Each structure stands twice: as structure tokens, then as C-alpha cells.
Image: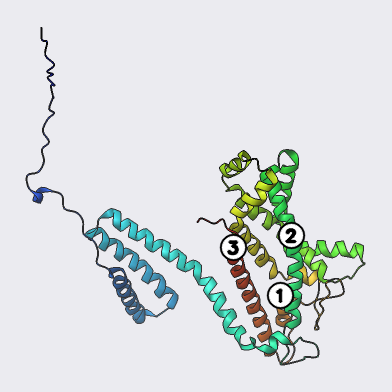
Amino acid sequence: MSTGTERTDTVTQGPELDLPASPDLLPKAKGTLPKGTAWGVFVASALVVGGILAATGFSIGLWVVLTVVLFAVATYVLSRVVEGARKATDRLVTVVVSAAFGVAMIPLVSVLWTVVSNGIARFDAQFFTYSMRGVVGEGGGAYHAILGTLIITGLAAAMSIPIGMLTAVYLVEYGKGRLAKAITFFVDVMTGIPSIVAGLFAYALFALIVGPGVRMGFAGAVALTVLMIPIVVRSTEEMLKIVPNELREASYALGVPKWKTILKIVIPTTAGGIATGITLAIARVIGETAPLLIAVGITTGVNLNPFDDRMATLPVFAYYSYVAPGIPREPFLDRAWTAALVLMVIVMLLNIIARIISRAFAPKTR
């Protein structure tokens, strides 16, 4: 019998690991292509394809396509040999995605270049300060159409943004049962309404109220409102859904009412996304021609009253300048292209304003 306090621990040793005795026996890592290799391969591919097509018949489109294909194959093979299969696949996918992005950018760049190159000729002070009253050939401008577009679009935004946002808040925060399902169904239906149907609806509505043959700016604003509301509802609804419920629950735990939680926490959290959705809705309708052609018409002078008679708008102004030009034809076409350019500039400014609003109302992280 042992009376001491000594303790003997038995340690069982496992099998010894067979480690390589020399670093030379370790598997060697794959290499890495030098910087600039991708550009070198791309230039070489372009030269090879260009040389082949120069002998058989050169085509810019075919040259670009074959250059990208040869560049992708050469990059994959070279990377497979030097870097391994995994890195080669990564490089190949990068080339494919970049090529797809380039293909998607071709129509956008083409439209921008065409509109700017054709519209810059009349992008002058006279175009922004003169109307077409009394103008037959050269000269004149779209001052009346610019004002009409801003007034009608502003009225449409003033009507559709509150309705759309409140509808989205109801669907996300309060909506349950048949009413919410019915509203969702009608919003989905309104999303697919053709623009000309909205114009016919506005014209029929005001024809019943005012009389047949009515043309006024407010009717056009109502038509644009019908087109804007579903876009505002859908974009705002999706933004409100991504707000974590933990934020709402934390606010409720502090005793904040639900309406104040929505106003002070939920909406400011998604202000950037909501502003972007509203901007997209405005950009969607600001270039509509069919509903304004039916409900508003066209005039050659300035009319700032949307409740009285016809008004000019940039889309309709460009449409008539193109399909019904006078003699000589060129001044009318120049004004049509410049009107399209002005519309693009307005949409760009709206996007900038949306960015500023989103930064101003976004939650502060510091």
C-alpha cells in the first residue's frame, strides 16, 4: 500500500509520422504568370486574328469576336500549364464574364454615341430659350417642350410617389388577408399595362368629365401616374422587405409606436434604395410618347397651365420633328436628336439627385 502523493502518468505515444527528410521531396507549388501576361496575350491574339482576316477579308465585328475567342483559349492553355487547372478555370470564367459585359455595353455605347453625335449640333442657347412659334425652317428651340415635360412629369411624380410609397408600406408592415392580396394582384396587373392603354384611360376619363376632344397637361400627368405607381410600389416594397426585423423589434422594445418606427427607422434605412426606385420610375415615364400624344397633344408655343389646352413635351416634340418634318428636312431632324439628348441629360441629372438624396438620408454609421 502506497502512502505517498507521487503520481505516475502513463503517456501512450502514437505512431511516428513519416515526414520527408529533405525539402526537395515536398510537392512543388505551381507557378504564377507574370503581370501583364494577359495584356500581352490579348495584343498577340488581336494581331494574329487581324493578320488572318487581312488576307481573307477584314471585318471589325468578326475581328473582335475571334480575338476574344483566341484570347480565352490561349489564356486558359497558358494558365493551365503554368498555374494549374483551378487558376486556369478562374481566368477563363473571368474572360467570359468580361466579354459578356462588353457585349451588353455595345448597344448602350452605340445609343449614347448616336444621340450625342447627332444632337450636339443644336445643343445651344437658342434651343433652350426659344419655342417653335412662328418658326418654319431653321432656328427655334424646345423651350416650351422642356417646360411641358418638367411640369407634367413633376405632377405625375407628386401624385404617384406618395401613393406608391404608402401602398408599399401598407403591404409590408400592415397588409394581411384578402385586401393585401387584391392590391398585390392589381399592382402586378398595372405593371404590364402598355403605355398607350394608360393614355387612352386618361383621355377617356377626362373626356367624360370635360368633354370629347379634350387635351391638357394634367391628363398626361394622370396617364404617367398610372405607369409610375406600380414601379414605385414594387421598388419600395422590395426595399422595405430587406430591413431586418431586429431593428423593428428593438424599436418596439423601447416603447416606440409602430408608425414612428416606420417613419424614423424603416424608411430612413432604405432611403437610398427607395430614391433609386423612384428615379427609375421617373426615368421610365419621362420618355413616354404614346400616352402624351393621345392625352396632351402638341403645340408650338409656351403653355404653363396643365389644366388648360395642349402642352408640348420633349418626347412628342421629337416624334413630330422626325415623322412630320418640314422643308428643309435637316433642321427638324437636328431638333429631334437634340430633344432626345436633353431627355438623356435630364435622366442623368435625376440619377445624380437620387444619389445625393440617398447619401443625405442614409443611416449614419459613425
Q: Secondary structure at mark 2?
A: helix
Is residue 196 in view?
Answer: no
Task: Give the numbered dot on residue 360.
Answer: 3
Near-viewer residue (250 or 290) = 250
CA separation in Å, label 2 and label 1: 20 Å
Taking depth in this image into account, of 129 and 29 the one nearest to the observer is 129
Three-letter amino acid code of the residue under disc 3: Ala
Question: Relative to residue 351, is residue 144 drawn left or right?
Answer: right
Contact check, label 1 and label 3, Cβ < 8 Å: no
Of helix, strand and loop, which one carries label 3? helix
- Which quadrant of the rendered structure holds the N terminus? top left
Looking at the rendered structure, which numbered label has been put on residue 315?
A: 1
Mark 1, residues whose alpha carbon is within 10 Å: few (<14), some, or many (≥20)? many
How did the renderer colour the structure? rainbow
Amino acid type of the residue tagged 2 in the rendering: Ser
**Residue in the picture at 10% in, 10% down:** 2
Badge 2 or badge 3: first in the primary sequence? 2
Is residue 322 in view?
yes
User: Image quadrant of residue 298?
Assistant: bottom right
Q: Which residue is mark 2?
A: 160
